[in-house]
Every structure is written in structure tokens, then in C-alpha cells.
Amino acid sequence: MQTRTQNFSMFDSRDYPKPLDESIFESWLEQGRESKISYAFLLVIWDEGEQDYLPKFAETRDEIAEYERLGESYGRQALVAAYDLYSEGKIA
């Protein structure tokens, strides 16, 4: 019997430009945790030029405030969400 893994998507609603595969998100969390720099947060950024999500990592909460929120931004990049790398809790 063959088992299928189900892919889940994040940001799958009209409030977001497109869905993000959860396996990509999980790989970003892992990348941030394994970094030699002591990052604490994963920022999910929408890049208007690339028409895709990008990961950004931050050491402090102050760095999160440097990005305008999706829907409120007129720049090329906008913050979609921010997560604690270790608890995986959404903080912004």
C-alpha cells in the first residue's frame, strides 16, 4: 500500500498574493535555526518584483518593524508574517 504525503499551503486566501507550500516554510525554519548567526525570528516577505515569498531572518524584534506590512506597503518588499524560530509561534 502506497502512502501519500499531503502538502499543506499557508497564506491560501484572498488576503495573500499566493499560497506558500508548508514544506518550504519548514525548510526556512530549519535554515534559520542552523545558521551560525543567532537568529530568533523568521520573516516571511512578499517580493513584488519576484512575485514570490522570501525568507528573511532577524536577531531582534526591532528588525521586524523595518518592513511595512503586506497591504500597507508601496515598496517592493512587504512583511507577510513573522515567526519565532524556536516556538514557531506567529508574532506579527
Image (cartoon, rainbow, N blue to C red):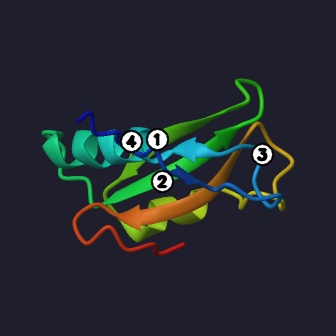
Q: Callout 1, which amino acid? A: Pro
In this rendered view, identify the residue nearer to me: 16 or 74. 16
- Which label sits in the foreground, 3 or 1? 3
Can you give x and y, in whole percent of width and height, for residue 44 in the image? 53, 50
Distance Cα–Cα, label 3 vs label 1: 16 Å
- Depth order, front residue of 12/25: 12
Question: Could you give the CA–CA distance between mark 3 and mark 2, rounded to whole angstroms?
Answer: 16 Å
What residue did someone put label 4 on?
A: 23
Label pair 3/2, CB-CB below 8 angstroms? no
Task: Determine contact: label 1, label 2, CB under 8 Å.
Answer: yes
Give the image location of residue 22, x and y in percent. 45, 48
At x 48%, y 53%, the residue is: 43
> What amino acid type is highlighted by mark number 2?
Leu
Gap between marks 1 and 4, in whole Å?
A: 13 Å
Disc 2 and disc 4: Cα gap in Å?
Answer: 16 Å
Q: What residue type is labelled 3?
A: Pro
Which residue matches tag 2? 43
Q: What element carries label 3?
A: loop
Residue at the far top in the pictured view:
50
Eye-nearest disc, 3 or 2: 3
Q: Nearer the viewer, mark 2 or mark 4?
A: 4
Q: Are marks 3 and 4 in contact (CB under 8 Å)?
A: no
C-alpha span from label 1 to label 2? 6 Å
Q: Name the residue under label 1.
A: 55
Image-based side of 9 in relation to 4, left or right: right
Q: Of marks 1 and 2, which one's residue comes earlier in the chain?
A: 2
The mark closer to the camera, 3 or 4, is 4
**Amino acid found under the numbered disc labelled 4:** Ser
Q: Which of marks 3 and 1 is nearer the N terminus?
A: 3
